[in-house]
Image (cartoon, helix red, strand yellow):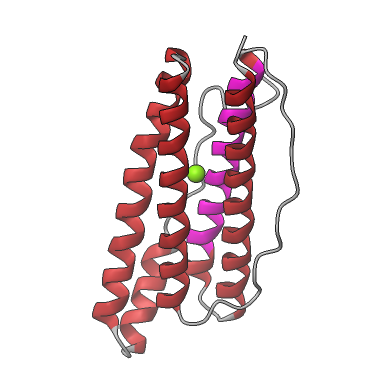
Amino acid sequence: MIKPELESAINAQINQELAASHTYLAMSAHFAAANLPGFSQWMDVQHREETLHAKRLFRYLLDRGGRVTLGPIQAPPSEFGSPSEVFRRALEQEVANTDSINRLYDLATTVNDHATKSHLQWFLDEQVEEEASIEEILGQLQLAGEDTSALLYLDDKLGARSTPEPVPGADASN
Ligand code: MG
């Protein structure tokens, strides 16, 4: 049985993953409206991934005999500015999420919950990838500058990103 303070913190993290999912969906809509379907697709995949992250924690909490309590999610903006501004915001969101997972790991350490630490290891590794991929795109946008051809090339490239495979344990119906 999971300790109540950890149950509460995992529920907060589930909410944070769903809030991130919601923001990425809004970013996908923003890019679709800006005639950048590749960027829109990339953000849609990101949206789906965040939902899967929430479901991983959802399933884990249930497996540990905890109770899942979903909270409200704040409405994301509908306007995000230039592609660089959108990705800067995405990076800020990921950095905040990394901090949040680190705090959750600290709490699991404090209460000696080794199974939760083990479960969170996957998230720590994932955050390294998340931040690196967004930083790479930001760097490429900087290289593209005001060059529309370069921007459209990048849009084409990002559009090739495919929908993530469901991860074991992430499907709440399992
Ligand atoms: Mg996530």
Q: For residue 60: magenta?
A: yes
- Examine the rendered structure and indicate whether residue 89 appears above or below residue 1: below
Q: Nearer the viewer, residue 21 or 61?
A: 61
Location of residue 170 in the rendering, given as x and y in whole percent from the top left corner: 57, 28
Q: Nearer the viewer, residue 65 or 170?
A: 65
What residue occupies the far top of the structure in this picture? 1
Q: Nearer the viewer, residue 110 or 127?
A: 110
- Residue lying at 74% horizontally and 43% vertically, measured from the top left: 71
- Residue lying at 33% horizontally and 55% vertically, measured from the top left: 133
Res 34 quadrant in image = bottom right
- Residue lying at 60% horizontally and 60% vertically, measured from the top left: 23
Q: Is residue 32 left or right of residue 149?
A: right
Location of residue 37 in the rendering, given as x and y in whole percent from the top left corner: 53, 71
- Examine the rendered structure and indicate whether residue 73 appears above or below residue 145: above
How many numbered badges does the structure rendering display? 0
Location of residue 145 in the rendering, given as x and y in whole percent from the top left corner: 29, 86
Quadrant containing the N terminus is top right
- What range is drawn magenta here? 41-62
What residue occupies the far left of the structure in this picture? 143
Location of residue 22 in the rendering, given as x and y in whole percent from the top left corner: 64, 56
Q: Is residue 125 left or right of residue 48?
A: left
Does the magenta stretch mainly form a helix, a strand or a loop? helix
Q: For residue 24: magenta?
A: no
Res 105 quadrant in image = top left
